[in-house]
Amino acid sequence: MSRTLTWTPPALALPGGWRGHSEALLPWLLPLGLALLWVLASHYHWMSEQILPAPSLVWQSALEFGSGELWTHLWISLQRLFWGLLAGVAGGLFLGTWLGASKRAEALVYPSFVALAQIPTLAWIPLFMLFFGIGELLKLVVLIKAVVVPVTLHTLVGVRDAQPKLREAAAVLRLPRHLLFLRLLLPAALPAFLTGFRLALATGWTSLLAVELLASSEGLGYLMVWGRQLFMLDLVFLCILLIGLVGALMDRGFGLVERRLLHWPQPATGEQRRRNDARGWRRLEGALLPAALLILWQASSSLGWVDRNILASPLDVVRSLADGFQDGSLPHAMQLSLQRALAGLVVGGGAGLLLGLLLGLSNRTERVLGPSLSALRQVALFAWVPLLTAWFGLGELAKVVFVSLAAFFPLFIATQRGIASLSPQLGEAARTLRLDLPKRLQLLILPGAAPAIFAGLRLSLIYAWLGTIGAEYFMPSDGGIASLMLGAQQMFRMDQVMAAMVLVGLVGALLGALGQRIETRATRWRHA
């Protein structure tokens, strides 16, 4: 897509051949420069090898571990990912199709499903550890939870919003149910399902590495923890490179599969049903399932069907919430976590916004920095934990850096893409009016890219909160809601674990709603 609002610094006049070669070399400038700096830092001992291992040491580790051990751990991680994807995608496909095809099922089940989905996968891990131990079942359950949510939500939308005219045609032709599914619902829902599958692939890979970092004796996550404990950062570097390569190959491979499957033309303006807010009996239906589950849960605990040390009753969870607010432990822990999330959002989100503006405005800068940033984005977030703890320790600085990394990419990508997708007519108007760069930013570029920027801000809010939970898990802390959960898990206080989970889910939902509200108010002119 042509970008007419970009600003490119004047270039030297070069012959055509040299200009073509220089353009081809631009994406390699940053990685080659970093590699040169790495070699010089190693040669002149600017940093200790325990902090920054020499390239030769990383290569030696690649030869040593690449002879068998590295591939063994990679194969174990990929096997876990495969079985988790298989179970999670199958469950999400079934649940999403059922909810999308049945209004009654959607009214009954969907509110409860969304409420549980608000609790991040990381927040479930202490509870899952108490339920399932730290063996292979734990990894499978964590993966299924991470995968089933995006697949279900996207499949539901695809099935539910199948074009009404096609439904009418199917009713006129009196298509049987199996043909209705194969010829109408499946093709209509396939694009949304594939989007959900791509998100599930990335989420599953990240969640697998997180649980392997916490509780595993095999896999890439375990290998990184082992290397970090022995101060073998060369092995940590090698694992990070391998994790990024696997992530890039999965994303590229799925993109090829997606293009082959979606070979029919997609309508430019597909019709969707207008959905009214649930009122009256519909709203009551949505509360039936959670009410029934709570009653069954309380009854099973009161009648002794389950051990309270394994599954605390709802009343015990409510008491823990009340006690936590009364003694101030929960508000204090939540305050510390929110402060870390806000600091990471300001640092990482601000850097993402500025860098997204720079790359969106300058084609040359995008050619230099874009490929390297895209490669870094393929590295799963939690793969950076061992390296960050080695560089920054286990204090507040390391946590803020990790949260900043989590918040950086959503806003960076949204800003860059928002500017890149601006209409060429705006560029023509800017040239006609002879606007300089500051005026273009103020009057055309920022207002035009505002929807994408605020959508990215909403995602950065959510990712900053997820990063905060992860930072408190992997970097021992004196406070924070995740630290409180881990302490309660070690004392087998299920009521406290579940009370903290409720708060984490509520804060995540509130941050998502806050981001949506900010986006709606900041771009309300779109609906004028």
Image: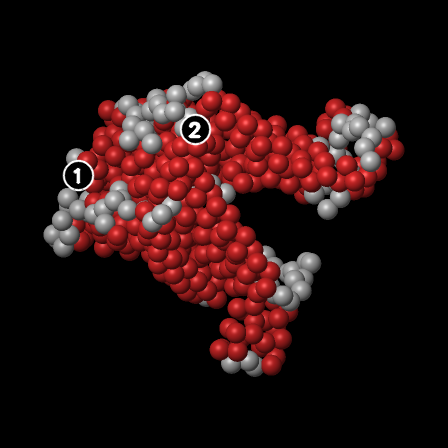
Question: Residue placed at 46% from the left, 48% from the top?
Answer: 246
Task: Give the quarter of the image for residue 421.
Answer: top right
In the drawing, what numbered circle is on residue 492? 1
Question: Residue placed at 52% from the left, 74% from the top?
Answer: 182
Give residue 400's position: percent from left, percent from top.
Answer: 42, 25
- Dot 2 or dot 1: first in sequence order is 2
Report helix, strand or loop for mark 1: loop
Give residue 391's position: percent from left, percent from top.
Answer: 39, 24
C-alpha gap between disc 2 and disc 1 = 44 Å
Question: Residue placed at 21% from the left, 34% from the top?
Answer: 488
Residue type at numbered disc 1: Phe
The foreground one among 246 and 518 is 246
Give residue 88's position: percent from left, percent from top.
Answer: 38, 58
In the drawing, what numbered circle is on residue 54? 2
Vertical side of 339 occupied by 86: above or below: below
Report helix, strand or loop for mark 2: loop
The answer to whether the residues at label 2 and label 1 have Cβ atoms under 8 Å apart is: no
Tell me, yes or no, if residue 454 can be seen here: no
Residue type at numbered disc 2: Ala
Give residue 214's position: percent from left, percent from top.
Answer: 29, 39
In the rendered structure, the answer to whether residue 56 lies left or right of residue 251 reads left
Tell me, yes or no, if residue 289 can be seen here: yes
User: Quadrant where the C terminus lies?
Assistant: top right
In the rendered structure, the answer to whether residue 317 lies left or right of residue 35 reads left
Vertical side of 369 occupied by 89: above or below: below
Pair 2/1: label in front: 2
